[in-house]
Image (tube, rainbow, N blue to C red):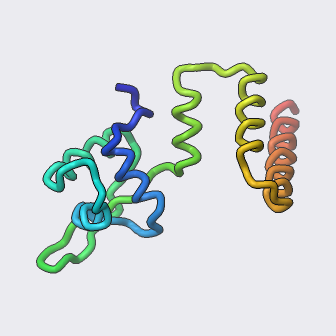
Amino acid sequence: MSRATLTKSERQIMDLLWRTDRPLSASEIIDLSPDRSWKASYVHILINSLIEKDMIVPTGLARTSRNYARVFVPTTTLAQYSVRVFTEGASLPTEDVVAAVEELLLAAADEPAAISALRKMLDAKKRALKAEEK
């Protein structure tokens, strides 16, 4: 299996971690996943798999009711993961990248703030490319 590819169960855990703005322990992952497709006893196998895929890292310990438990955070954002899946194993031609960005823009809301943010990103990328040329 590809490093970038997540199983359905792994993706459920990652979606939870991406939505949560704090590190979570295995028991919290279980508690916050009432509609999970995996058994609670399987959480440690899923966590180890996500660590091996460099999707999460342990960031310390948190006190639980009786002991301490490792807590985990994502190593990448959902957007970064999506790009990694989209581009894995492929050297994308410029026209494919432009077409993908165009489709994302068409699917996004028509908000001036989003357009302004995109313009700033494109300007920053242009400056970086010009700096590399020198």
Q: How many marks?
A: 0
Residue closest to the far bottom = 65
Q: 40 or 93: which is nearer to us?
A: 40
Q: Is residue 70 among the parts visible in the rendering?
A: no
Residue 126's quadrant in the figure?
A: top right
Query: Taking 52 as reference, is 64 left or right?
Result: left
Q: Is residue 61 among the parts visible in the rendering?
A: yes
Q: Residue at x 59, y 37 (%)?
A: 83
Q: Residue 13 at what x, y percent from top left?
A: 35, 53
**Image quarter (top left, top right, bottom left or bottom right) of the C terminus:** top right
Q: Residue at x 75, y 29 (%)?
A: 99
Please tell me whether residue 42 is drawn above or below residue 68 in the rendered image.
above
Q: 84 or 132: which is nearer to us?
A: 84
Please tell me whether residue 100 is drawn above or below residue 112 in the rendered image.
above
Please tell me whether residue 52 is drawn above or below residue 73 in the rendered image.
above
Query: Taking 86 as reference, is 116 left or right?
Result: right
Q: Residue at x 25, y 46 (%)?
A: 46
Q: Residue at x 81, y 59 (%)?
A: 111
**Image quarter (top left, top right, bottom left or bottom right) of the N terminus:** top left
Query: Taking 127 as reference, is 45 left or right?
Result: left
Q: Residue 75 at what x, y percent from top left?
A: 45, 51
Q: Residue 51 at what x, y percent from top left?
A: 32, 45
